[in-house]
Image (tube, helix red, strand yellow):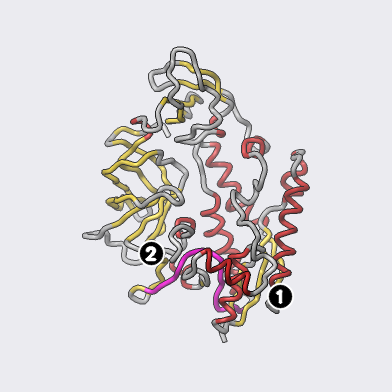
Amino acid sequence: MKKVVLGLSGGVDSAVSLIELKKQKYDVKAVFMRNWDSLTNDDILGNPTIEDDICAQEVDYLDARKVADQLNTPIEKIDFIEEYWANVFQYFLSEYNKGRTPNPDILCNTEIKFKAFLKHAMDSDADLIAMGHYARKGWIDGRPALLRAVDQNKDQTYFLSQLTEAQLEKALFPIGDLTKEEVRKIAIDNHLVVANKKDSTGICFIGERHFNQFLSNYILAQKGQMKRLDGTFIKDHDGLIYYTIGQRKGLGIGGIKDYDDEPWFVVGKDITTNTLLVEQGFHHPYLYSNNCIVKDVTFRGNKDLTNRTFTAKFRYRQKDNDVKLTWLDDTTLKVEYPNRVRAVTPGQAAAFYEGDVCVGGGFIDTVYLDEAKRKY
């Protein structure tokens, strides 16, 4: 009987994953991962919502324990706080300091769940690890492949796109063949205490807090000028770290004299002058690009791209975009999308697909329309 260590988060997806693993006769042990120390990292900064965050984290742990008890499964709580701080959160801060918009959930998977957690599991003589992600694993030419989940609306392969073959080989995704409705029904039928628990959203270390308030605890925001592309001054901004490409809300520039009522959007950032670039119109041409450079690419399977058809997602739940991929070096791809895509943003992840197979992914570095670099 193979030994599996399951990441049990206190939510319904990982709870049903435990049920599915037991159905498949695995010898299962559960682990609750604690990746963020609110007391250490926030209390010294005077964060007024720290108590709520600690309570939320403790509720998740207690829920995970209740599920483990219901399903007669041993559980332990493991801290990966130092690893998360060093390998995820510091990267998150450095990207914001560069004016980019990072996605820490990607690194949380590659650095914590499928690296630090995987090492802990292997050190405890496990054969495999399992997570409650909506994704599937298959095999192509004897190599592990990441496949889209059956439930396309919940598919999470975008967040798993940068896993290596070695990481994927050791992973199981027990609910990848189920829809969210089926997962809920299984939880209800088994009387799990988390059967009707609301899904968690947002970044784990921010929780329900106001994002700008949280970010200001760690990065000194520098006010600057908000301008149109032609240099026309609009108003002052609160700091480039608070804005992302394509953003509409929070600009505070509706109803400006001598302008029509069409909404304003962030179309770019000039880091050298600390200038936020804004224009009117959801489909403003400067928001569109047709190629970008993606770095730090993990690519699974055959790296020969000749005569193959790929699509890409530049954001979670974005529709697939037809792309042409060209290697610039071993870990850098030029990604061309002739139909143009709105608000492709440096710092975000690009996930690449060949049909239902997610072949890899990397981080968007530079964005272009033809040969013109965008000030993103």
Residue 274 inside the magenta-drawn segment: no
- Badge 2 density bin: few <14, some 14–19, many ≥20, Cα 10 Å: many
The extreme top residue here reads 258
Q: Which residue is mark 2?
A: 300
> Residue shown at 41%/38% (left/top)?
343
The image quarter in which residue 270 lies: top left
Residues drawn in magenta: 125-139
- Locate the C terminus and report the quarter of the image it occupies: top left
Q: Which mark lies nearer to you, 2 or 1?
A: 1
Residue 133's place in the image compared with 318, above or below, is below
Q: Secondary structure at mark 1?
A: helix
Image position, residue 82 (x, y; %):
67, 55
- Locate the N terminus and report the quarter of the image it occupies: bottom right
Residue 90's place in the image compared with 359, above or below, is above
Q: Nearer the viewer, residue 44 or 198?
A: 198
Instruction: Give the spatial CA distance, label 2 vs label 1.
Output: 38 Å
> Residue shown at 60%/46% (left/top)?
90
Is residue 301 rendered to the left or right of residue 308? Answer: right
Q: Which label's residue is closer to the chain start, 2 or 1?
A: 1
Q: Nearer the viewer, residue 323 or 283?
A: 283
Residue 174's place in the image compared with 288, above or below, is below
Q: Secondary structure at mark 2?
A: loop
Residue 70, numbered circle: 1
Residue 137 inside the magenta-drawn segment: yes
> Residue shown at 53%/27% (left/top)?
251
Q: In the rendered image, is residue 120 in sight? A: no
Task: Identify residue type, mark 2.
Answer: Arg
> Residue shown at 67%/63% (left/top)?
10
The extreme left residue here reads 307
